[in-house]
Image (cartoon, helix red, strand yellow):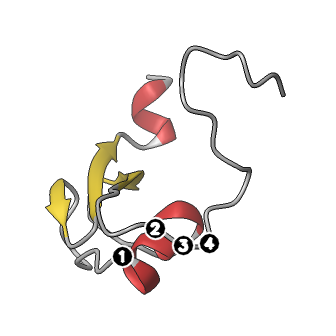
Amino acid sequence: MSNNHPYKIIPDRVIKLAENQIFVFGINTQGRHGAGSALFARQYCNAEYGNPQGRQGQSWAMATPAAAYIFS
């Protein structure tokens, strides 16, 4: 990856956040933090199980519609 990119590029895997950083992640509309970035947010960034939106600890949840909804 080029260091000349106009936006901040992060590594493929986040392992730790600085105190002033927020982890933004997609979550299902039920707020089930069961896998992937949502699970990371729950385990390491104080995301709230059952809450599909907004600031949660050191994270920000963005609800995403189910695949069936997208293709209907």
**Farthest residue toward the bottom?**
43
Give the structural element (helix, strand or loop) at label 2: loop
Q: Quadrant of the N terminus?
A: top right
- Residue at label 4? 15
- Residue at label 2? 17
Whether the residues at callouts 2 and 3 have beta carbons within 8 Å, the answer is yes
**Farthest residue toward the front?**
4
The answer for how far apart the CA atoms under marks 4 and 3 are is 4 Å
The answer for how far apart the CA atoms under marks 4 and 1 are is 11 Å
Q: 58 left or right of 36?
A: left
Whether the residues at callouts 4 and 3 have beta carbons within 8 Å, the answer is yes
Q: Crowdedness of circle 1 by 10 Å Cα count: few (<14), some, many (20+)?
A: some
Place of residue 33 in the rendered image (x, y in percent of width and height, measured from the top left): 41, 73
- Residue at label 3? 16
The correct choice, above or below, for 32 with respect to 24 in the image is below
Q: Residue at x 50, y 23 (%)?
A: 71
Give the structural element (helix, strand or loop) at label 1: loop
